[in-house]
Amino acid sequence: MNTDKPLKILVVDDEALARRRLHDLLNDCRQALPLTVVGEVESGREALHWVQNSEVDLLLTDIQMPDISGIELAKHLLKMKQPPRVIFVTAFNEYAVQAFELNAIDYLMKPIRIDRLLAALRKVPALEPISEVQLAGLPTGARRFLPVVGRTRIELVPIEEVIYFKAELKYVTIKTHERELLLEESLIKLEQEFAPDFVRTHRSYLVAKRAIKSLMRGSAEGSGVDGDHEDDGWKVELQGISELLPVSRRQRGALQAMLKSRE
């Protein structure tokens, strides 16, 4: 980070009053530290779009936002080659913010004091980008979007649009009704994160429960070994698409029980 130029800051908060107050505090800090507020946005998705199209050194982001939490936003920023630094702004109580201290992540408590803000800004030139390990130590739920990395930008795919994930070599294919996209994550990790809403049907497939229509017995021709149990011809039928997915013997019982529970 170039310390000779003013610190370029993006303010991220879904509440207009909170953005205005933070902007005013940053203006007051200019007497002691060269900085400029390059923009203010009200959502994590807007923030991600902004940093991919403009030069930003630091995000001051609220944690609790309706579309993407500040923590999920920071996870998506990790996919960038040169992610900006992040300082979280939170109204969490002192007990909850212990997780930030244990994982060496800087944060500001609301209401923000100007002396605390100035101290945090002065540390930014020496601040390293937040790592995946640090973020993994924070209390957070499953992501609402998945980051698909293209040649020049990161695209966010809503998890609610995903029909299934398919493991293929080093990548996972995301299948939606309209497209197939490559995701650089493991199927095991996705299964752990989205267990309430997705179910493993086969070693290579993780399927949205809402998309499963029925199980059917197909031809056993071409069935192979999924690594643990033979695929003996059972398939899963999905809502809205004609493709039938393989079902392993290991997973068939759980799928039958899930479908029976809907009756």
Image (cartoon, rainbow, N blue to C red):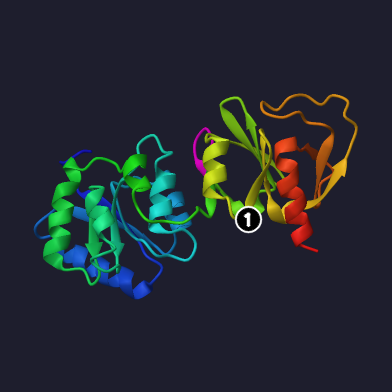
Q: Is residue 175 above or below residue 48?
A: above
The residue sitting at 34% across, 45% down in the picture is 55
- Decide which of 211, 199 is in the foreground and name it: 199
- Decide which of 106, 16 is in the foreground and name it: 106
The residue sitting at 49% across, 40% down in the picture is 153
Q: Is residue 53 left or right of residue 115?
A: right
Assign the C terminus to one quadrant of the image: bottom right
Residue 169 figure quarter: top right
The residue tagged 1 is 160
The residue sitting at 55% across, 38% down in the picture is 188
Q: Is residue 260 left or right of residue 31?
A: right
Q: Is residue 20 left or right of residue 160?
A: left
Observer able to see residue 86: yes
Which residues are the magenta region?
Answer: 149-155
Q: Amino acid at mark 1?
A: Glu
Crowding near pointer 1: few (<14 within 10 Å), some, many (20+)? few
Q: Position of residue 204 (x, y in %)?
A: 66, 33
Q: Position of residue 210 (x, y in %)?
A: 71, 56
The residue sitting at 33% across, 75% down in the picture is 17
Q: Is residue 221 above or below residue 166?
A: above
Observer able to see residue 248: no
- Decide which of 96, 87 is in the foreground and name it: 96
Q: Position of residue 71 (x, y in %)?
A: 38, 54
Residue 18 figure quarter: bottom left
Q: Is residue 218 above or below residue 114?
A: above
